[in-house]
Image: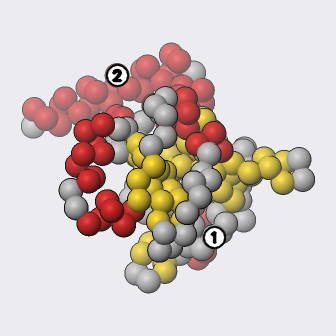
Amino acid sequence: MRQTLDIHDYYFGVIVATPEYLESSKRVRLLDGIDYDPFSEISDEAALIFGVTTLLKKETRDGQCYYIDQYNSRYKNELVYQLHQPDKFGIYLAYVKPFTECYEEEPTWYLEEEITKGDLLFQIQEKHTYYISYSRLQNSEAIVTLNSYEDFECDPVRQEYLKQLLGEEMYSRMTERNKEFVKDMDIQ
């Protein structure tokens, strides 16, 4: 298989739910028992305010930029966003940051079929922060990040989005209050 994935086409984006999305029956997007709702793991309030970070592929069509959410799509190109516009479901792309600004290491390619056979994944995790998996069987390529960008504490993209949204001072107050709340919860 020819390695064609270009990491410069990929971005991290913060997507937030609109009230219309949360109230819509289209939110239920199941396929083979898998829930493709990007906000299923967080509260509706968090989905409206904080959103979630997802990996997006940028494409340009007719002079306009589109961001394809391959991870949360049930089928190819189901979720396609434009910056600062809700999509057909009511998911709003609020912020984007190039993948290469988050991961500076050069891409390394690994054959998916070899990774699943042995203990190659452990060796990869020791050497890399991400890798590109390619499969001869499925004729596909994908970026695999090895640290969890979905966890808010480890999510600099969402933190940058919130700083931009709230301003530096309000963001600092919010995070300090959250740290105090967590500390109080630990004491009890």
**Position in image of residue 49 (x %, y %):** 53, 44
**Position in image of residue 147 (x %, y %):** 34, 42
Residue at image point 65% right, 44% down: 9
Quadrant of the drawing holding the C terminus: top left
Q: Is residue 62 left or right of residue 152?
A: right
Question: Could you give the CA–CA distance between mark 1 and mark 2, rounded to whole angstroms?
Answer: 41 Å
Asked whether residue 4 is in view, the answer is yes
Q: Is residue 135 left or right of residue 90?
A: left
Label disc, if present, on residue 176 of the rendered structure: 2
Amino acid carrying label 2: it is: Glu
| Relative height, residue 153 to residue 44 (above, below) | above
Amino acid carrying label 1: it is: Lys
Q: Is residue 88 left or right of residue 132?
A: right
Residue at image point 60% right, 51% down: 5
Question: In which quarter of the view is residue 26 placed?
Answer: bottom right
| Residue identifier under label 1 | 76
Query: Of callouts 1 and 2, which one flags the residue occurring earlier in the amino acid sequence?
Result: 1
**How many tags in the picture?**
2
Judged from the image, the secondary structure of the residue bearing numbered disc 2 is helix
Q: Is residue 119 left or right of residue 56?
A: left
Residue at image point 59% right, 58% down: 2
Residue at image point 60% right, 35% down: 97
Question: In which quarter of the view is residue 177 placed?
Answer: top left
In the image, 48 versus 128, the foreground residue is 128
**Position in image of residue 47 (x %, y %):** 50, 52
Quadrant of the drawing holding the N terminus: bottom right
Bin the neighbour count of mark 2 within 10 Å (Cα to Cα): few under 14, some 14-19, many 20 and up: few
